[in-house]
Amino acid sequence: MTTQLSSPEGMLAPVPYHHVSVATGSRHVEVAGQVGHHDDGLPTDLAGQVSQALRNTARGLAAAGATFADVTRLRFFVVGWTVDRMDDFTAGVDAVAAELGLPQPMPPASLIGVEILFEPGVLVEVEASAVVD
C-alpha cells in the first residue's frame, strides 16, 4: 500500500476519518467533484447522494488505476450543511464503505458547507486525491 493513514494521539477524537496520510508513489490522481447522478437519475436524499457520489468517485479512481486504499484526501461539499445532518451523511458513507473498500475511518477528509452547487437538487459533491506507484 502506498498510503498510510494515522491519527496521532492528542488530535480530535472520535472522528470518522484519519487526521494524517503519508503517501509514496510517482503518480498523483485527482478526481474532480463527483455528485450523486446515476442511470436512474439523482437521489433526493443526502444519504443516497453521498453513497452514489462515492461510487462515482470510485469509478474515477479505478480509471486511473487507483482505489480508495490509495486516497490521501477527500473533500465533501454539502449544500445547506448543519450538524443535525451528520447522521444522514454518515449513513450514506456507511452504506457503501464495504462495497467500495473505503477505509474506516476514512482518509483525511473535509466536510465543507456550501450554499449551492452547480445544479439544483445536487446536495453533495466529493473530490478525491490519491497517490499510486
Image (cartoon, rainbow, N blue to C red):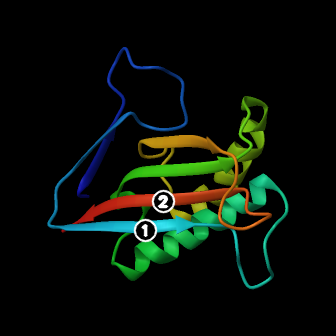
Residue drawn 43% across the image and 59% down it: 128
Tell me: 65 left or right of 90: left
Q: Where is residue 120 drawn, in percent x and y? A: 78, 65
- 17 or 110, nearer to the observer: 110
> Which residue bears the numbered disc 1?
31
Tell me: 63 left or right of 112: left
Q: Where is residue 111 drawn, in percent x and y? A: 56, 41
Is 33 located above or below residue 37 in the figure?
A: above
Residue drawn 46% across the image and 20% down it: 12
Residue drawn 46% across the image and 51% down it: 74
Q: Where is residue 122 drawn, in percent x and y? A: 73, 63
Q: Amino acid at mark 2?
A: Glu
> Which residue bears the numbered disc 2?
127
- Secondary structure type for disc 2: strand
Give the quadrant of residue 50: bottom right
Q: Are marks 2 and 1 in contact (CB under 8 Å)?
A: yes
Q: Earlier in the sequence, mark 2 or mark 1?
A: 1
**Quick one: label 2, few (<14), some, or many (20+) residues within 10 Å?**
many
